Each structure stands twice: as structure tokens, then as C-alpha cells.
Image: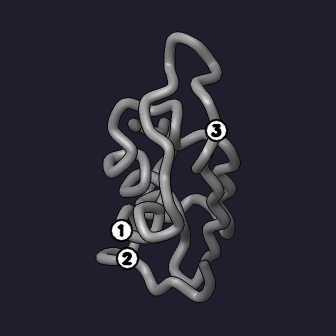
Amino acid sequence: EDLPFADNSFDAVFSFAVLEHVKYPFQAAREMIRVLKPGGKIAVSAAFLQPMHGYPHHYFNMTSMGLKVLFEDDIDIDDI
């Protein structure tokens, strides 16, 4: 939820099977956007119908609509 990088550091950000393990996914999404360079790309996936895993830190499963809500106010979404 608090990435140790300067603003606009990366051309691309990848987050695969991470967001279900963070306590504050909206903050994590904002951080991904913060470190992304203008015009950069973000690729994200998160658990939907998966049982609890990564004990003790598995907080949220997400639908594609829920995942979209994490990012839609701050970046343009090309595909879900």
C-alpha cells in the first residue's frame, strides 16, 4: 500500500494475485497509478472464486467490476 518509488517511475506496473493479500486495495491501486509514468500501462489480476490462501493475509476476492472500481477514477481502462 506504500510503494518505495518516486512518482512516475515505471513504464508498466504488473500486479498478479497480489490485491487479495493487501489490507487496503484502494490505497494499493492509487500507489500503482502514482508510480506509473504518463502513458504507461497497468496489468492487474486478482482472485475471484478462490478459497482462502496465503494465510493469514487473504482479505478480498474481487469480481471484474470490483477490480475496475479500484482504478476507474484515476486512469483510463482499456480492457477488463
**Residue 79: quarter of image:** bottom right
Q: Position of residue 30 (x, y in %)?
A: 36, 57
Foreground residue among 73 and 52:
52
Q: Going 40% across and 68% down the picture, which residue do you hit?
A: 71
| Tag 3–tag 1 contact (CB < 8 Å) | no
Task: State left or right for residue 7 relative to residue 45.
Answer: left
Q: Going 51% across and 26% down the picture, which residue do you hit?
A: 58
Which of marks 3 and 2 precedes in the sequence?
3
Q: Going 64% across and 51% down the picture, which residue do you hit?
A: 15
**Residue 9: quarter of image:** bottom right
Residue type at mark 1 is Val
Outermost residue, top side: 56
Q: Mark 1 = which residue?
A: 69
SS category of the residue bearing label 3: loop
How far is disc 2 from disc 1 in space, using C-alphas?
Answer: 5 Å
The tally of labels here is 3
How far is disc 3 from disc 1 in space, using C-alphas?
Answer: 20 Å
Identify whether 66 is placed above or below 26: below
Foreground residue among 54 and 38:
54
Q: Mark 3 = which residue?
A: 50
Q: Mark 2 = which residue?
A: 72
Residue type at mark 2 is Glu
SS category of the residue bearing label 2: loop
Q: Position of residue 1 (x, y in %)?
A: 40, 37
| Tag 2–tag 1 contact (CB < 8 Å) | yes
Identify whether 54 is placed above or below 25: above
Mark 2 or mark 3, which is nearer to you?
A: 3
Q: Position of residue 17 (x, y in %)?
A: 66, 42
Mark 1 neighbour density, 10 Å: few (under 14) some (14–19) many (20 or more)? few
